[in-house]
Image: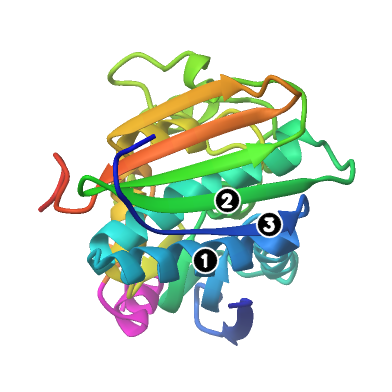
Amino acid sequence: MTTPTKGRRSISVSATVDELVKVRAFVRDSVAGFGGSKRVADDLVQAVDEATCNVMLHGYRGNAGDVEIEAALRERKIEIRILDRGPTFDPTAASLPARDAIPAPTRPGGMGVGIQLLRTLTDEVHHSARPDGGNELTLVRSIDGHGEED
Amino acid sequence: MAMTIDVERLGGTTPVTVIALAGELDASNYEQVIDVARNAYADGSRGLVLDLEHLTFMASSGLFALHSAVRIMRGETPPDAEEGWGALHQMAQDHDAQASSVRLAAAQEPIARVLERTGMLRLFALDGTRAEAVAALQGA
């Protein structure tokens, strides 16, 4: 990869929801470090919390494990990668409700409003299975604005 | 940031409980909110105000807790964890936010945004202040 990236940073937490507070602080600090607005930080904090919570509860299902979060700025886009060693699961393949339907908020880790939020809060969501086991979920959000920006 | 919960019971013709949440509401603590709502209903409260003035973050698990609080205050069982897409859709059809016995007060912008984006504002009246929310429930 030859594209310049700015200040790649990462954090590793154990797969328990008590660690989500650290993940959110990491995302908030990273976005601020890249020069992103509070609005961009709020949206990415929400998205990463949902995705990471999903990995912890839906992926690891209470089993011990780690989740690694990486953040980088590339060509005015913030890229956040969420890496785990849980069973392969692609949230981007989850079916979406009809346009006028409202998804129910399910218990954390359920397939409810969280997936819809992920899509709403970011510009791109990519999933890939890691060759040596686990998942890599990449969330991309422009640092400069968003289609939904007020 | 952890979350703190401050509970105040108010008398009146419609007993109302005010639950003030401060900090971050997420998957690690949302069940506390459901428990407080359940206790409030058991103690005779028929109106609930969630004062969100000092809440800085709400995950979708928090939305689930709010959804549960509505069901509890209607004397119903909280929603099934696995109901998925259908439950809230169904609820939105039979629900009038202004008539709800659960009101949200003083939500900060990021919280209001997540409520709006997820369609939850169809279920909850959002009041500017805690006092307005209490007055609306007590018909003052």
Check disc 2 and report the residue beneath it: A69
Give the overall secondary structure of the magenta segment: helix
Give the left or right position of residue B140, taking residue B90 as reference.
left
Disc 1 residue type (three-letter):
Phe
Q: Chain of mark 2?
A: A
Q: Residue at x 74, y 40 (%)?
A: A57
Res B139 → quadrant:
bottom left
Check disc 3 and report the residue beneath it: A12
- Give coordinates of residue B7: x percent, y percent: 62, 83
Marks 2 and 3 share the same chain: yes
Q: As displayed, is residue A134 above or below residue B117?
A: above
- Give coordinates of residue B105: x percent, y percent: 36, 72
Disc 3 residue type (three-letter):
Ser
Residue B130 in sight from this viewpoint: yes
Which segment did they paint magenta? B128-140
Check disc 1 and report the residue beneath it: A26
Q: Residue at x 59, y 25 (%)?
A: B84
Residue B34 in sight from this viewpoint: no
Label 1 with label 2: CB-CB less than 8 Å: yes
- Give coordinates of residue A86: x percent, y percent: 77, 31
Q: CA distance from mark 1 to mark 3?
A: 10 Å
Q: Does the magenta portion include A111?
A: no
- Give coordinates of residue A34: x percent, y percent: 30, 64
Give the left or right position of residue A56, taking residue B84 as reference.
right
Q: Residue at x 64, y 46 (%)?
A: A53
Q: Secondary structure at mark 1?
A: helix
Marks 1 and 2 share the same chain: yes
Q: Residues within 10 Å of mark 1 (few under 14, many from 20)?
A: some
Q: Does the magenta portion include B136?
A: yes
Q: Chain of mark 1?
A: A
Label 1 with label 3: CB-CB less than 8 Å: no
